[in-house]
Image (spheres, helix red, strand yellow):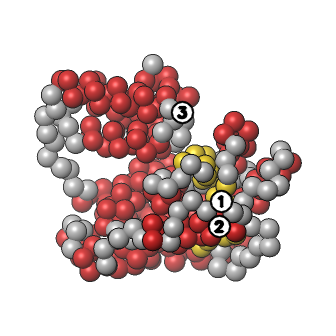
Amino acid sequence: MKKIMIVDDEPMMLKIADRALKDFYETIQASSGDEALDLYSSQSPDMIISDLKMPSMSGQELQEKVKEKGGDNIPFIFMTADEEFESDTADYIKKPVKADELLQLVNGIFDRTGKKIITHAELKRGAGDTKSEREKLPQWLVKSPLVNVHAGLNNSETAEYMLSAIDIFLEHADSNLQDMEKFYEEGDYDNFTVKVHALKSTARIIGAMILSTMAGAMEKAGVEGDMEYLRSEYPILIDEYKKYVKLFTDNKEVEAKKDIPPDELEDTLLAIKEAVLAEDFSLTEDAIEYLEKCNLSPEKEKYISDLKENLYQLDWEKLHSIVG
């Protein structure tokens, strides 16, 4: 099975790309260019899919460093929300990334290099149409004036993915807000622009089109050095971001938890440990999400919470330490 490394500092984008590819390819995830370089040396991927704009190292800089390590023939795909971006040295796909489009692009590249391993028919994932998927969403979300569910479903492709994306949005909202506020207050407008660039894309995936448009305008101001616009619109953007956080937090549905037999709990915890040691993001996440729906002791709930927090930070060293 061909191996693809996905690189993005936004956990939501990592998860979306991973879900699009994991049924057909072995996937490796990295949350920064530096981590990607370390993994490249140890994992030898057949392709790299990277966000274009990331703090400290851009996707293009990562491509150059991979070439310096002897990876001249490694196919690169850039993920970007920049409508004007073009490249002669790599393929690219516009955000928000859709599963079928990414799969077709990946398959086409492997086809050109004689490494095709899946057929066009296999790319058809059978996602429901927007109307049928809309019926699967909770009514508070459908009726919210802040959320364009039609746009969210078009970008997420299914209700399940959209709701999962909202969970990830909430999971990282506090840290993202802290980073944005820190960069702005320190006058680090380059990294502030990178953060609002990412927000522009992630907001579209959950149908937060107002927030996405505002983030896009802030990104443009950051690139052009329009300080007057940044100063006047910054507090409005932060307030708008917090409106969505409050909406999702207040309405987040708490499912009735079920009891889990001791032997099943033990087996699931063992499965988590094995998945963590194998650094398998998807299996670890699936097992964690299953246990989150079960009645657990306070100690086990804390254990699962710690695992989830470090999983979405891709801190495998810490995860190894937690599971022992």
Crowdedness of circle 1 by 10 Å Cα count: few (<14), some, many (20+)?
few
Q: Are marks 3 and 2 in contact (CB under 8 Å)?
A: no
* Residue 107 to residue 57: above or below: below
Crowdedness of circle 3 by 10 Å Cα count: few (<14), some, many (20+)?
some
Q: Which residue is mark 3?
A: 316
| Residue at image location 64% in from the left, 79% down from the top | 83
Give percent across and percent down for residue 319: 48, 29
Q: Are marks 1 and 2 in contact (CB under 8 Å)?
A: yes
Give percent across and percent down for residue 174: 46, 50
Label 1 vs label 3: CA separation? Answer: 30 Å
* Residue 36 to residue 157: above or below: above
Q: Is residue 290 visible?
A: yes
The amino acid type of the residue labelled 2 equals Asp
The amino acid type of the residue labelled 3 equals Trp
Q: Which residue is mark 1?
A: 115
* Horizontal side of residue 279 vs 67, given as left or right: left
Foreground tag (3 vs 2): 2
Q: Element at badge 3?
A: helix
- For residue 322, what is the image quadrant? top left
Q: Element at badge 2?
A: helix
Give percent across and percent down for residue 36: 68, 45
* Horizontal side of residue 302 vs 234, given as left or right: left
Between 109 and 232, the one nearer to me in the picture: 109
The amino acid type of the residue labelled 1 equals Lys
